[in-house]
Amino acid sequence: MAASNGKNFKVIGTRPIRHDGVDKVTGRAKYGADYAFPDMLFGKMLRSPYAHARIKSINTDKAKALPGVMAVMTAADLPDLPDRVESAGEAPINVAHLTQNLMARDKVLYNGHALAAVCATSPHIAEEAVALIEVDYEILPPVMTVEEAMKPGATILLPNLRNKEEGDKQTNVASHLQFKRGDVAEGFKSADYVVEREFKTAMVHQGYIEPHNAVAMYNSDGKGTIWCSTQGTFAVRGLSAAVAGIPEQDIKVVPAEIGGGFGGKLTIYLEPIALVFSKMTGKPVKMVMSRADVLRATGPTSGSTIRCKMGCTKDGKLVAAQVWMAYEAGAYPGSPVGAGAMTIIAPYVIPNMIIDAYDVVVNRPKTAAYRAPGATNAAMASETIIDELAEMCGIDPADFRLQNAVAEGAAQTAGPPYKKIGFVETLEALKNTPHYKSKLEGPYRGRGVASGFWFNIGLQSSAVVNLHGDGTASLVIGSIDIGGTRAAQAMVAAEVLGIGALDVRPQVADTDTIGYTDVTGGSRTAVTTGVAVFQAAEDAVRQLKERAAKLWEKKPEEIAYTDGVLSTAADPSKKLTLKEIAKQFARTGGPITGRANVNVRGVGPSFATTCVDVEVDPDTGKVKILRATCVQDVGKALHPSYVEGQIQGGTAQGIGWALNEEYVYDDKGILRNFGLLDYRMPTCLDLPEIETVLVEVPAPGHPIGSRGVGEVPIVPPVAAVANAIARATGIRMEVAPMSPPRLLKALLKKRNGADSQAAAAGR
Amino acid sequence: MAIVVVPALLRKLTDGVERVPVTGRNLGQVIEDLERQFPGFREQLVQNGEMKPSIAVSIDGEMGTGGLLDRVKDSSEIFFIPAIGGG
């Protein structure tokens, strides 16, 4: 969709090839597990076979005695950190919980929880030695759901977790948030239609293709280096320093290429363990997880229970909402329930609302961020009910959303007003798509619509632009390239410098080479690092003007720089291209380096609306996705192909969440599907070409107008699929994933006459 | 005077009052004024002389970046909201 912020871009909005493309397609790109050094050792973790147990003793004698074993580690080899919440750049983190999650101290809190590690001359010896470690466990009852965890008298996971709202008692409820507006009771009184349902979404994994890895070398000078696949080198440095008890300034983190993260590589698992092993042995140490390790012990996102009630008038005006939501934090506090609460009704003007949100610990892996954390769960609840209310009012689902949509000036859930946003525009654009205009016919076929909101975040970034003697530039940033960052940021620099995107060579630098830069997450990188790169390039242009002023004996403010050419209105005969003045750098003052460090506030949030057509097999419950379109406000697309890729990826992940993905535990809390054959993610055979529409409502305050694009497309798909299934079958599914057995059960119940909502909702 | 919009669960400190007029040229001074008016507020928001990492601040519709040093105008509207992490 054509739109602009009034600027005539030359590079932004085009589709150059990616700078790192050749390395990627020829296999030369170096990922974390590719790093190798002479005399390198290999580390492996011992993981708990139980969901909940007290560690009575650990005997490592046999493991230590195995030839080839160089060191064995337990929590006793790491500092016993106190409860202390620190900012890890993007979100707060309790360092005691972090270190206990990496290496259990007194209790194991989930199946797969690490409690010891071995370092040996080969990975096979390390594995063999891990099996020789003897642990005496006192097995405790597992607490697997928020309902069990919140019951009075529930087994307590963390003895120090206390509920100050209820007399400072031990609890599994880590926090309670509340958002309130207007008078909910009065609001519901004015409603003609009210729908209330309880939804459950399963714990799901980010599913990045590359397992976690780390190579560490601790030198005799007391300095250590970590090479790893991460979404944030500075976060790895800070968190590893805390866990390992090594000063932050003594650690350098070098980013490897990254094979996906989606939020799951914002935190650490192996990095400080490898570093401490290297310190113990004096040799480089490599640790790489298996897929089973990844699924059992690294950050999935929360499963959730959400009770949502909403009401509207006959003419489709939303008047009240009441939400109770509890998210599984995993073994330690920190689910994204706050974000879930602040997104669940964010797209709509609802004058009366109350939202209560609970963060609950359970005997499952500690959750980590996953693409718009918390928002997809929430949208399944609210967007299903919105769809049902639209149906009751007899209003088209896009029109229903349009007439309740937030726009500039409307209050966000937490209170602050929205600035310029593009939700209305995405809905209008959806109505004009060939997909939405097409007819869907046939039995067991249905079309579902859902919308989603995500905040996007700002934070800190650094950038350096070096101009070279041939008129090209190199760009140094600290943001990990997880979805085309190098190409997009090179385009930003090229735009300002008036040169081609491929005339800028971008690189992601280590923590000693570039200024502090927060993680690649929160949909911040293109936007916020984009501001840093924009300003760094402007700084270089400022210096170019000074050089031309010197050559032409003018004042810098008399010099213009347009499309890579310096000129002055005072003398139209004088012009210098970047290439020409670059040859004169030496005699005008030396090399030119532009730089910028920013802490950006006020980034533009994003909205997306997804439309999905499905066909349900009434005999098996299998859902086939016939067509999917996502319409998203992207502000201004830097590189439209990568934006489209983000939208397609988010939609694909959302469809996987909707239809198949879930952690399956047995009654003892043991994970039963820790491989990708059983943890069923969608493949290209499961999905049609996902159509994308880029709506461009420029974000105010951003030099290009860009908004974060990576997260919001995962928010609507689960609800969109649920709504499509409802239109196809008449069944409102309340549990995700809506997998074949679950949907078939609901179909059979409906067919057999058990027509109550609960019976037919997939429970 | 600037206005602090009190989060729902902290309104127990303000007898249910949602919008509290405050004085101060920066966020630190605003919180000190809140503490003076409603004792107990500071410990909900501040830890070791800094804003708690779990709390974000919106001033006039923009997320604060300077912690207690963030500038506040007489006309400012201030919200304390949970810090959010993305993926």
Image (cartoon, rainbow, N blue to C red):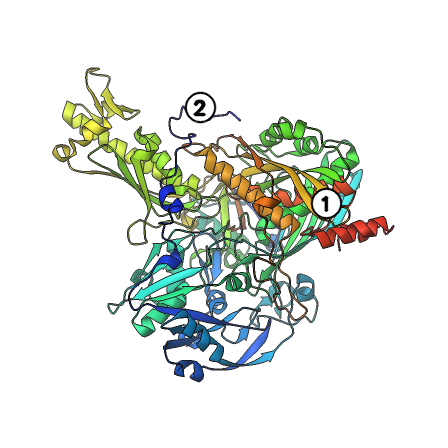
Q: Residue at x 58, y 76 (%)?
A: A53
Left-right relation of A145 to A416: right
Relative to the observer, which residue lies in front, A578 or A313? A578
Q: Is residue A696 visible?
A: yes
Label drawn at residue A642: none
- Which residue is at 45% across, 76% downward? A128
Nearer to the camera, A332 or A584: A584
The quadrant in which residue A721 appears is top right
Number of numbered discs visible in the structure rendering: 2
Q: Position of residue A10 (x, y in %)?
A: 38, 26
Kindly report which numbered mark, 1 or 2, lies closer to the viewer in this rendering. Answer: 2
Residue A247 at what x, y percent from top left?
A: 33, 65
Q: In this figure, which residue is indicated by the disc labeled 1?
A: A184
User: Can residue A377 be seen in the rendering of this structure?
Assistant: no
User: Compared with residue A425, is residue A124 higher up or lower down, i.e. above or below?
Assistant: below
Q: Chain of mark 1?
A: A
Q: Chain of mark 2?
A: A
- Residue A6 bears which disc, if any? 2
Question: In the rendered view, does B14 fall on the left or right side of A192?
Answer: left
